[in-house]
Image (tube, rainbow, N blue to C red):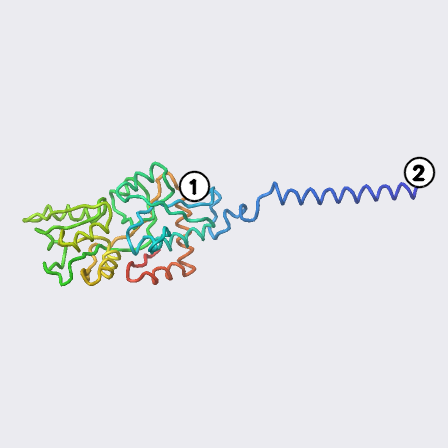
Amino acid sequence: MNLRGLIRWFLLITMLAGVLALAACGDDEGDGGASPTEADGGGGEVDVSGVPELEDGVLNIGSDIAYAPIESYKPGTETPEGLDVDLANAMADAMGVEAEFINTGFDGIIQALNTDDFDVIYSAMTINPEREQEIAFVPYVQVGTGIVVPVGNPDGISAVEDLCGLTVAVQLGTIQETLLNEENQDCTEKMEIVTFDTNPLAVEDVRTGGADANLSDFPVAYVDAQESDGELEALDVQIDPAPYGIGVRKSSTELKSALEQALDAIIQSGKYDDVIEKWSPVAGAIER
């Protein structure tokens, strides 16, 4: 082979090597390499790449979905809606994952979290010392207790101490049940505390005359009265306002940090205020 032939052969081999190298790079990006979504931890504003619970791209949420307007099903559907639902969806979006709600009875919801039935509790759960012994919290709104009575307030109730000697309906496992039991210790004439698995059942007991009053979170009391066709009213008082918290297992430190960052992100973006305004006057914004 002459010199010109050798040069031509060398150039052909060089060009072929370059084509093969480019093809190999393309394969790495398309098959073996991380996609842009995987690389940035889910595609949201918050990096969740180091959060084990979110590796599947889903935030599984335990919630007692019978507590309108905080969380309830849209009429005739199995689609949840409410304050907690909107906030959870906004936070999940900030983390680049989907929010999946799992309907769970409130009385056993902390135990269900601690046995890994879901990732977090987002269920109008007021933070208190007893619950903080079992799980960690991310505070997100400020809410007090409300009192629902028959329209006209026939017993003249204006405060929790006025419930002494009366029959009071309340949901099992709530802070309102604890509040009533504590108040009952100071009553000269004891109140009869009747517990129900869900708050709507407790409200119905008042509506049908079985109980004289119902205690629930103020947002819930407000809506229960509005939807009673004029049979019930909510007193214009909030007892012991306290923060709701997103419940997290104490071992889920990475998830708790991601939730805090996601909450900060939706506060800064204005989405948080939009949700609070949408469900006003059910809850007060929390300062972070």
Q: Quadrant of the C terminus?
A: bottom left
Query: Residue 86, how many percent across, how many down?
Result: 38, 55
Determine whether 107 is above or below 268 in the image: above
Closer to the camera, 95 or 116? Answer: 116
Q: CA distance from mark 1 to mark 2?
A: 66 Å
Label 2: which residue? 1
Say left or right for 156 vs 241: left
| Residue at left offset 91%, top offset 42% | 5
Q: Residue furthest front?
A: 76
Q: Residues within 10 Å of mark 1 (few under 14, many from 20)?
A: some
Which residue corresponds to the image point at 18% horizontal and 48% vertical from the top-left? 179
Could you say which is closer to the camera, residue 184 or residue 58? Answer: 58
Amino acid type, residue under disc 2 in the picture: Met
Mark 1 or mark 2: name the one nearer the start of the chain. Answer: 2
Amino acid under disc 1: Glu
> From the image, which quarter does the N terminus lie in?
top right
Q: Position of residue 206 (x, y in %)?
A: 16, 54
SS type, badge 2: loop
| Total numbered badges shown on the rendered structure | 2
Q: Residue 249, located in which quarter of the rendered image? A: top left
Coordinates of residue 143 in the picture (x, y in percent)? 26, 55
Residue under pointer 1: 53
> Local crowd at mark 2 within 10 Å, few (<14), some, or many (≥20)?
few
Which quadrant holds residue 278? bottom left
Quick one: 132 or 110, which is closer to the camera?
110
Disc ID at residue 186: none
Looking at the image, is 23 positioned above or below residue 280? Answer: above
For the residue labelled by badge 1, is the local secondary structure a helix, a strand or a loop?
Answer: helix
Does 164 appear above or below 271?
A: above
Q: Residue furthest right?
A: 2
| Residue 148 picture location, percent across and down | 18, 57
Cβ–Cβ under 8 Å for marks 1 and 2: no
